Image (cartoon, rainbow, N blue to C red):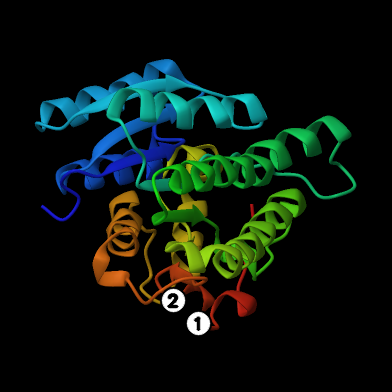
Amino acid sequence: MKFENRVALVTGAGSGIGRAVALRLAQDGAKIAVADWNATTGGETVQLIQQQGGEAILMQADVSKVADTERIVAETVGKFGKLNILVNNAAVMLEKTAVDTTEEDWERIVGINLKGTFFCAKHAILQFRRQGGGGIIVNMASVNSFFAEGGIAAYCTTKGGIAQLTRALAMDHSGEGIRVNAIAPGWIETPMNANFFALGPHIKEQAAKLHAINRIGQPEEVAHLVAFLASDEAGFITGSLMTVDGGFSAGLAPAMGIVV
């Protein structure tokens, strides 16, 4: 197994893409630190990993708090003795224009999506250094990192920031044997999107049409790429933003739109 004797910390691992990533890395032999604000769903992920023969721990955390980002790295190391892989997946969506976004809204979405990613990366890098260097960070960006959709201004801002943070971290720390990459999913079947799809039967159908493959993606399809980027097979890849979007960013999306 390609991640045998390696330890991965996955934030937002209680559901959706984060859970799929945690399960996939565990299947490939990694020990998993599951971090999520929701202890119930996070615990379910731990149970699923254990049921498939893997090893995992749960850490309830709010990554918008710097102290929590430091704590989950420390608790991971306290349990498993080291940290090799960080997957920054925790995120929230805010369906508002800039005009409708309050300061409280802004602080929440930037705190979780961008600040959390930044400081989890910081404390992971410090741990990589304590271990003598080397390590993997995979950040969860979005097609909204470079392609804006209406009504989610703050979300687009945070995802654009994650893309640039990924490049900056790669430039700063490649000399330490640390690789940093980001993934830009298209529309994925996750709890985050469930409320939007529930607005009407036509919504999911129209969202599917934004993708050349003409369907919504599955969390496991994102997890496959995370596993590749975290592996030695991706040893010459750093500072990259890779899409898993069924062709969303290939040119179809600007000519179409979702009408609620």
> In the shown orientation, is residue 75 left or right of residue 24?
right
Residue 220, horizontal then vertical, whole percent = 28, 52
Residue at 81 percent across and 50 percent down: it is 97
Circle 2 residue: 247
Q: Amino acid at mark 2?
A: Gly
Q: Distance from label 2 to label 1 (Cα)?
A: 5 Å
> In the shown orientation, is residue 105 left or right of residue 86?
right
In this view of the protein, can residue 258 be seen by the observer?
Answer: no
In the displayed structure, would residue 18 be above or below residue 236? above
Residue 1, horizontal then vertical, whole percent = 10, 52
In the displayed structure, would residue 155 be above or below residue 238? above
Tell me the element at label 1: helix
Residue 200, horizontal then vertical, whole percent = 52, 44
Tell me the element at label 2: loop
- Crowding at label 2, few (<14), some or many (≥20) Cα neighbours within 10 Å? some
Circle 1 residue: 250
Residue at 63 percent across and 47 percent down: it is 118
> In the shown orientation, is residue 29 left or right of residue 157?
left
Verify CB contact (< 8 Å) between mark 2 and mark 1.
yes
